Image: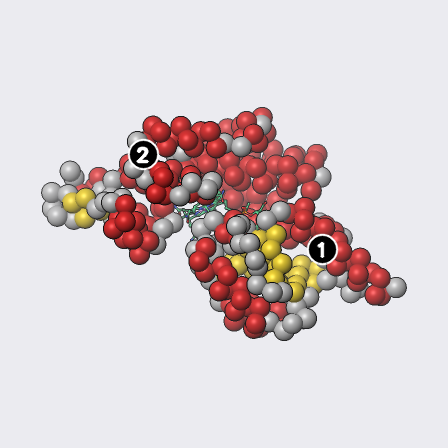
C-alpha cells in the first residue's frame, strides 16, 4: 500500500473528532480502528476506516453503543443509519437545501435561507427548519454525501442569518434579563448557541455573545464584569460527555449564586440529575418558555 493511501493518526483523529486516547481504548477493547503500515513502515488508517467510524459514531449518537455496532459489516451499518433518518430529512425543504449546498452556486443557498427566514418567522425558521436541517447536514456528511467544506458553508451561512436575526431584535427593555452566551474550551460548535441567542433576543432578553472556546475562568469573569443574570452554555455532541457534569459543577460553584447557569446541546442529553442550580434544556421551545418567565418577572418587578 502506498503511503499516500493511509491517513496519519493525527488526521484520523481530527477528521473523526475522536481523541487519540479514546481511539487507543477502542482498539484495545474492540480491535477497531486497527493501525495499518505502508511499504515504508509508516503507520496510519485507511479512508474506509474513517467512513466506518463515522457510521459507528452516528449510531452511538442515536443510542446504540459501539459494542453492538463495531464488528458489523458496512452494509449493515449503512442500513441502520438509513433507518435513523428522522422524518424531517424527507422534508422537501431539507432536500432543497442540501441540493443547493452541493450546487456550484452556493449564493443561492444563502438567498433561499434568507427567504425562508422572512417567510416562516424566527421561531419556525429555527425550530422547524434550522434544527432538522442541521441534523440532516450532519448525517449527510457522516454518510459521505457531502464534503466537510459543504458543512462549513452551511454553518457559516446559517450563522450569518442567526446573527442577522439577533441584530434585528427589538432593543431590550430596562431591567430585561441579561444573558451571556459562550462555549467552553475545546467546543467550537456554535450553532446551538446562536439559535438560542436569536430566539432569546427576539423575545426581549439582552444578549451578550462571547463566542466559542473560552476558558471557564473567562466566562466567570465576563459574567461578573457584565453583571449577567444568566450564563448560557452549549455542549455539542463533539464535547466529551464525561466533562460536562464536572464543568457545570465547577462553573456553578465559581459563579455568584445570583447568576443562573443554563446549558443545552447534545452532550447534555441523558443527564438525569443536573447539578443543583443548573438549568438543562435540550429543547429550544422549553428554553424560550423559561426566558419568557424571566422577562415577565422583570416587567412585574419594574412595574
Ligand atoms: C455544524 C457542525 C460542524 C460545523 C460547526 C460550525 C459552527 N460554527 O458551529 C463545522 C463544520 C465547523 C464542524 C466541525 C467539526 N465537527 Co462538527 N458537526 C456539526 C453538526 C452538523 C451540528 C452541530 C451543532 O451545531 N449542533 C448544535 C445543535 C443544532 O444541536 P444540539 O447540540 O443537539 O442542540 C440542541 C439543543 O440541545 C439546543 N441547545 C444547544 N445548545 C444550547 C444552549 C442553551 C443555553 C440552550 C437553552 C439550548 C441549547 O438547541 C439545539 C436544537 O434543538 C454536528 C452533527 C449533529 N447532529 O450534532 C457535527 C458533529 C458534532 N461534528 C463532528 C465532528 C467530528 C467535527 C469535526 C472534528 C470534523 C472535521 N473533520 O473537522 C470538526 C471539529 C471542530 C472542533 N474543533 O470542535 C461530529 C462529532 C463526533 C464526536 N463523537 O465527537 C458530529 C456529531 C458529526 C458526526 N455525525 O460525526 N462541525
Q: Which of the two labelled residues, at mark 1 and mark 2, occupies the earlier sequence position?
A: 2
> Which residue shows up at 35% across the image and 29% down it?
76
Q: Which residue in the rendered view is the most extreme toward the right?
A: 303
Name the element at disc 2: loop
Residue 130's image quarter?
top right
Q: In this view, does 253 lie above or below 292?
A: below
Q: From the viewer's perspective, is 296 left or right of 274? A: right
Dot 1 and dot 2 residues touching (CB under 8 Å): no
Q: Is residue 94 above or below residue 283?
A: above
Q: How is the image coloured?
A: secondary structure
> Which residue shows up at 46% across the image and 36% down it?
139
Q: Where is residue 62 in the image (x, y as percent from the top left)?
A: 47, 40
> Which residue shows up at 50% across the image and 28% down it?
99
Position of the C terminus by quadrant: bottom right
Task: Kindly identify which numbered label has been placed on residue 281.
Answer: none
The residue labelled by disc 2 is 72
Position of the N terminus by quadrant: top left
Q: Nearer the viewer, residue 242 or 129?
A: 242
User: Label 1: few (<14), some or many (≥20) within 10 Å?
Assistant: many
What is the tally of numbered marks visible in this picture?
2
User: Label 2: few (<14), some or many (≥20) within 10 Å?
Assistant: few
Residue 194 visible here: no
Q: From the viewer's perspective, is 206 left or right of 157? A: right
> Which residue shows up at 69% across the image and 53% down it?
200
The residue labelled by disc 1 is 291
Alpha-carbon distance for marks 1 and 2?
A: 45 Å
Amino acid at each position: 500500500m502506498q503511503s499516500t493511501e493511509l491517513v496519519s493518526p493525527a488526521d484520523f483523529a481530527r477528521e473523526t473528532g475522536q481523541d487519540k486516547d479514546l481511539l487507543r481504548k477502542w482498539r484495545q477493547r474492540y480491535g477497531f480502528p486497527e493501525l495499518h503500515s505502508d511499504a515504508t513502515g509508516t503507520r496510519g488508517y485507511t479512508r474506509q476506516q474513517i467512513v466506518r467510524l463515522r457510521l459507528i459514531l452516528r449510531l452511538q449518537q442515536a443510542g446504540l453503543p459501539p459494542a453492538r455496532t463495531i464488528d458489523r459489516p458496512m452494509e449493515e451499518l449503512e442500513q441502520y443509519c438509513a433507518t435513523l433518518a428522522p422524518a424531517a430529512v424527507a422534508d422537501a425543504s431539507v432536500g432543497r437545501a442540501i441540493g443547493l449546498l452541493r450546487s456550484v452556486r452556493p449564493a443561492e443557498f444563502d438567498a433561499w435561507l434568507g427567504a425562508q427566514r422572512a417567510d416562516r418567522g424566527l421561531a419556525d425558521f429555527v425550530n422547524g427548519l434550522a434544527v432538522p436541517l442541521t441534523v440532516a447536514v450532519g448525517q449527510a456528511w457522516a454518510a459521505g454525501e457531502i464534503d466537510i467544506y459543504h458543512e462549513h458553508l452551511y454553518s457559516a451561512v446559517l450563522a450569518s442569518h442567526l446573527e442577522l436575526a439577533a441584530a434585528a431584535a427589538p432593543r431590550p427593555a430596562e431591567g430585561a434579563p441579561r444573558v451571556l452566551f459562550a462555549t467552553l474550551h475545546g467546543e467550537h460548535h456554535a450553532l446551538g448557541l446562536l439559535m438560542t441567542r436569536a430566539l432569546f433576543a427576539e423575545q426581549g432578553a439582552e444578549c451578550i455573545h462571547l463566542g466559542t472556546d473560552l476558558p471557564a475562568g473567562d466566562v466567570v469573569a465576563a459574567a461578573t464584569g457584565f453583571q449577567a443574570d444568566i450564563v448560557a452554555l452549549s455542549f455539542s455532541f463533539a464535547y466529551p460527555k464525561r466533562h460536562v457534569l464536572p464543568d457545570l459543577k465547577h462553573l456553578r460553584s465559581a459563579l455568584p449564586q445570583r447568576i443562573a447557569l443554563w446549558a443545552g446541546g447534545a452532550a447534555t442529553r441523558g443527564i438525569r440529575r443536573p447539578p443543583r442550580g443548573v438549568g438543562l434544556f435540550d429543547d429550544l421551545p422549553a428554553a424560550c418558555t423559561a426566558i419568557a418567565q424571566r422577562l415577565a418577572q422583570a416587567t412585574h418587578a419594574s412595574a
